Amino acid sequence: GLYCFFSTQDRRYSTSFPQKSIDIEYKKYFGTDSFFSKVGEEKFFFMPMDYYRPNQAILEPLVAHVKKALVLKKDEVLVDLYSAGGFFSEMLASSAKKCLAVDIRKTCLESFKLNAHRRDRKNVQYFERDIHGSGFGEWIGPQISTKPKFILNPPVGVLPPQIINMVCSYKPERIIRIYQDPENIQKEIRKWRRLGYILQKCLPVDSFQNSTRMDIFVTYTIDRDEMLKAQHKNMKEAKAIQEKTILFQQ
């Protein structure tokens, strides 16, 4: 299809600005109203303005990598933040108890509806929400029925501290954070570390052929060594308090 796009704003999507659905209009000259990506035997449909990875050759191994990195289980919830049309939620739905896809852009909701119309998956839900909004943390809590795992695919930029804090508050065993700029990994890695998460694996992906742009899939896991040290320290402190109490009673 051939489309012409027009926007009243030229500012790029970025985590540095408040989230909103940017006003963009498009006119179709010819072609279908929607497109699809083929992932093995699966098809994922999306609207022209939705975010997608045009390098079809990497999609199937990429989904396999994400599934393996997350170690998804049938009793777990997958939270797909900044999900666009819910690509990973759709592809991984059979491996999880429930998938929650969240994005603010209306065109992403249209893409989700295209896939929901063609599939009978009851465990995938899409929400059009402002992830950076003040009440987002309180809203998403009741949606998560069990210990979750996260995929974060935000626009270019560093995640706001409240988002990192909110994700870590659920103590997920695995988090996949997708970056478009290696510098942002350096800026964020200490923030994750302070909250008990370390970088386990980093996978650069050529999502956009014949361009300088690249996706970097980073897997964060709980720093179990630090957790064990913290537990040991707490046990020693508790034992010392107990001994002082016994001495005082004597």
Image (cartoon, grey):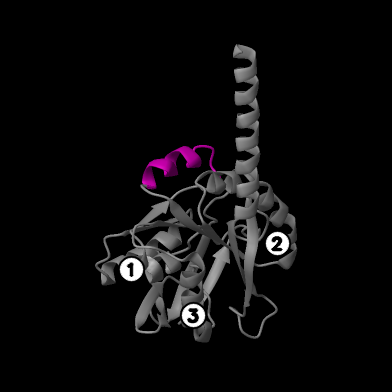
Q: Where 138 falls versus 119 (above or below)?
A: above
Q: Can residue 17 be seen by looking at this rendering?
A: no
- Above or below residue 179? Residue 238 is above
For the residues labelled 3 and 2, the Cα–Cα distance comes to 23 Å
- Callout 3 amino acid: Leu
**Mark carried by residue 59:** 3
Q: Residue at x 45, y 79 (%)?
A: 29
Mark-to-mark CA distance, 2 and 1: 30 Å
> Closer to the N terminus: mark 3 or mark 2?
3
Q: Report the front residue among 182 and 194.
A: 194
Question: Quick one: label 1 or label 3, which is nearer the N terminus?
Answer: 3
Magenta range is: 132-144
Circle 2 residue: 185
- Quarter of the image where one finds residue 220: bottom right
Q: Quadrant of the N terminus?
A: bottom left
Q: Say which residue label 1 marks.
A: 94
Checking the image for residue 226, the label placed there is none
Q: Secondary structure at mark 1?
A: helix
Q: Main secondary structure of the magenta part?
A: helix
- Which part of the image, by quadrant, shows the C terminus? top right
The local secondary structure at tag 2 comes to helix
Q: Is residue 156 left or right of residue 87?
A: right
Q: Amino acid at mark 1?
A: Ser
- Residue 55 in picture, x, y percent from top left: 54, 83
Pick whichever of labels 2 and 1 is earlier in the sequence. 1
Most foreground residue, 135 or 224: 224
> Are the residues at dot 1 and dot 3 in contact (C-beta closer than 8 Å)?
no
Indicate the position of residue 22 as horizontal and vertical percent values. 55, 56
Q: Is residue 143 magenta?
A: yes
